[in-house]
Amino acid sequence: MAHTWYDLTKLTGTADFTVQKVRLTASEIAIEGNFELPPMAKMSYEDQIFVAQFIKAHGSIKQMEELFGVSYPTIKSRLNKIGSQLNFIEVINKPDANDVLDKLERGEITPEKAIESLRE
């Protein structure tokens, strides 16, 4: 009998753990090793539900207030708590070569700046 994700999070609570065996349902292939869980999977089941609902509400705090029957500050506090559990990465947008050349052509940047942007 397959257990749910809720069963696993109920058993493990907030303890750190790794998954050592994964079985692909359709093919019955099993993969063994030490697999670290992604940050969202390490959250409590309740926080995972909250994040899923927040995404379904397209980030609308107003909808979250109505759904959970709590105030704006409560939603913000919960989001801050959840956010502190996640490791965010810094996204650096690489400039598009065509955009750089267009800016150079329009005189918005110097040739030196264009070269520097293209090298990044």
Image (cartoon, rainbow, N blue to C red):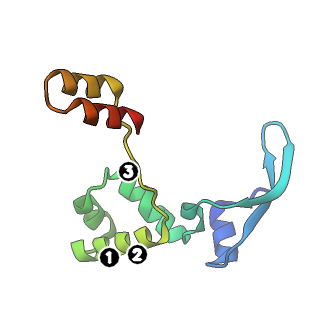
Identify whether 4 is placed above or below 99.
Answer: below
Tell me the CA gap for discs 3 and 2.
19 Å
Give the residue type at disc 3. Answer: Lys
Residue bearing the label numbered 3: 56
Residue placed furthest toward the front: 112
Identify whether 99 is placed above or below 12.
Answer: above
Residue bearing the label numbered 2: 81
Cβ–Cβ below 8 Å for labels 1 and 2? yes
Give the residue type at disc 2. Answer: Lys
Disc 3: CA contacts within 10 A as few (<14), some (14-19) or many (>=20): few
Task: Return the disc, 3 or 2, that comes first in the chain's sequence.
Answer: 3
- Taking the spot 40% from the left edge, 57% from the top edge, the residue there is 53
User: Where's the C terminus, which quadrant?
Assistant: top left
- Taking the spot 37% from the left edge, 42% from the top edge, the residue there is 93
Identify whether 103 is placed above or below 57.
Answer: above
Q: Position of residue 37 (x, y in %)?
A: 65, 61
Q: Secondary structure at mark 1?
A: helix
Camera-nearest residue between 81 and 70: 81
